[in-house]
Image (cartoon, rainbow, N blue to C red):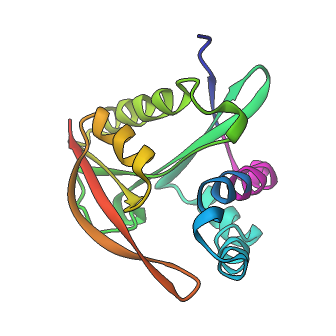
Amino acid sequence: MTQGQLKKIGVQDWQRLQQISIETYTDTFEPYNSPEIMDAYLTTAYEPQKLQRELKNPDSSFYFIEKNNEVAGYLKINLNGSQTEKMGPDSLEVERIYIRPAFKHQSLGTQLIENAEKLAQKYHKSKIWLGVWEHNEPAKHFYAKFGFKRIGQHSFFMGDDEQTDYLMQKVL
């Protein structure tokens, strides 16, 4: 199977990033949330100024993965104080691995998680971690396959609906 091409992106790519974020998030979570909760979340989570701030943050990096000259998804990593939980200076967070529906089951997620591990090594991090929704069985299975183990949980809010994310970590 043909590998995807990784491309680090910058603030100029915010509109494409917004479009793919909304498409992939909706595909994954719309069946489990009301339209009102989804609309409220998508409006704030992927608001233009917020995405532009994230793209400008020197401790966060975004990478598109392209296949057949089309953006198939993306990876977002966080270092240092940009991590969404205090996991320490020896950790790298994978905040998002989003794959568009038409590109699922083509090993692109595998390529992104492997790239995140390479980045962790490049930045001299000994741990890589992420949060995954407690009911997202395919994602939990995917990360476990790569050696991630549950180390805790935290609350995640979709509007005023409190949900639980499992925190999973891999020691490199």
- In this picture, residue 15 sits left or right of residue 123: right
Which residue occupies the foreground of this view, 152 or 123?
152
Residue lying at the far top of the rendered structure: 1
Q: Is residue 155 above or below residue 59?
A: below
- Identified at 42% across, 35% down, the residue is 113
- Identified at 73% across, 53% down, the residue is 23
- Identified at 24% across, 56% down, the residue is 89
**How far across and down, in percent of the image, does residue 100 sit?**
68, 41
Q: Is residue 112 above or below residue 162?
A: above
**How far across and down, in percent of the image, does residue 103 sit?**
67, 31
- Identified at 81% across, 55% down, the residue is 15
Which residue occupies the foreground of this view, 92 or 73?
73
Residue 17 belongs to the span the image colors magenta = yes
Q: Is residue 61 above or below residue 160?
A: above
**Label tally:** 0
| Magenta stretch bounds | 9-22
**How far across and down, in percent of the image, does residue 87 sit?**
25, 62
Residue 104 belongs to the span the image colors magenta = no
- In this picture, residue 123 sits left or right of residue 126: right
Quadrant hosting residue 158: bottom right
Residue lying at the far bottom of the rendered structure: 160
Location of the C terminus by quadrant is top left
Which residue occupies the foreground of this view, 43 or 102?
102
Which residue occupies the foreground of this view, 155 or 114?
155
Give the main secondary structure, helix, strand or loop, of the magenta stretch. helix
**How far across and down, in percent of the image, does residue 26 sit?**
68, 59
Location of the N terminus by quadrant is top right
